[in-house]
Amino acid sequence: MIESSGGPLSGIRIVEFDAIGPVPLAAMILADMGADIVRLARPAGAVTAWDDVGGSVLHRSRSVVHVDLKNPDDRAQVLDLIARADAVVEGFRPGVMERLGIGPDIGLARNPKLIFARMTGWGQSGPLALRAGHDINYIAITGALHAIGKPDEPPTVPLNLVGDYGGGAMFLVAGVLAALLAARTTGRGQIVDVAMTEGAATLLSMFHSYHATGSWQDQREANLLDGGAPFYRCYACADGRHVAVGCLEPQFFAACLQGLGLDPQLFRQNDRATWPAMRAEFETTFKTRTRDAWAALFAETDACVSPVLTLAEAPDHPHNRHRTSFVTRDGVSQAAPAPKFAPDASIVREPSASDVATAVARWNQR
């Protein structure tokens, strides 16, 4: 079993019910920070391909125990773990934990300081609460999906970063940490109801503010931060690769024009009527050099021009290497723990396996 070995959450004990999407990422982050997490997975013979989504990366830094939640003996031992835990994280549809006899009411009755964090797409209540869905569905009803992409094409699918991970995992981590602080102050546990729809909607707060003041058009690629502005978008280079341009402020825009060799007298940055011509000029100019040539030219400037790197290239970028932003484990390159702490540094720990009785016994000794 994994012993807590430092990190700001050292000593915090969490029971994680195996899931896909935001639950394993949130648990990975908490485990990297030092939390002692027991991941409860289905019996080995019942595992499907979807049960191992994220595998060696998302399941790092914590131990795994295979349990049959329909088995009364296994269920009783799971309740013993919950009784000794600081928090539970789960991602079942509403009502599943209650039907299994391990819902928040039972957990809090045995452990009044317990944090019971529930991760779903739609939330624990509402007309859609019991419906199936995925990231693309959750962000569709928030306005986020509508805002991303080209105006004459269907919305662009932004990986599953907006719903699952931005609106889900990050809000799950924040909810657990806030509830843990409250429990230490009040001695009272919490039920944390995390909905990806609501997390994604919260991420849109600035854009709602812009929209309310009339400075944001409710259409794609027509605004400052959605690719509409020629100085905040990506451009193809001579080799077919791309650079990202983000020179929003006037001094950074001037640096970008200087690097491109363009006459600043010809460009009025915030005059939207000139944006189509400016974009065409930028497109033509960026195609005159390769991506890496532009990256080298702009490397020592504040022009806010960066190479668009692939997943394979990113770990070798000099800044990422200096920061040790990526680590390699079992031959797999992956993000290092973030954020960084001192002196209680987060670390990637090796996962391990045991049975639930061993996990209960270990927690009983602490």
Image: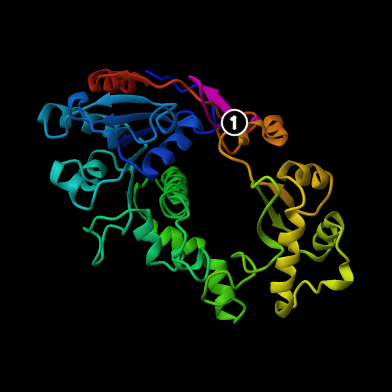
Q: Is 298 displayed left or right of 243 in the figure?
A: right
The residue shown at (58%, 76%) is 216
Q: Which residues are magenta?
A: 324-335
Residue 334 x/y as whole percent? 53, 31
Q: Where is 363 relative to 153, above or below?
A: above
The residue under label 1 is: 326
Above or below residue 236? Residue 97 is: above
Identify the image quadrant of the N terminus.
Answer: top left
**Quarter residue 229 falls in:** bottom right
Give the prevailing secondary structure in the magenta stretch: strand
* Residue 13 visible from this viewpoint: yes
How has the structure been colored for display? Answer: rainbow
Residue 72 horizontal side relative to residue 14, left or right: left
Decide: is 65 above or below 22.
Answer: above
Which image quarter holds the C terminus? top left
Residue 98, position as x, y percentages in the image = 17, 47
Determine which quarter of the picture holds residue 106.
Answer: top left
Residue 97 located within the stretch drawn in magenta: no
Question: Are there few (<14), some (14-19), or many (20+) residues within 10 Å of tag 1?
Answer: some
**Percent of width and height locating residue 277:** 73, 72
- Name the kind of residue labelled 1 in the image: Phe
| Percent coordinates x, y for residue 168 in the rendering | 41, 51
Label 1, secondary structure: give it. Answer: strand
> Residue at horizontal 61%, vertical 71%?
223
Decide if residue 247 is in sight here: no
**Residue at the spot x=33%, y=36% of the render?**
16
Residue at point 54% right, 26% down?
347
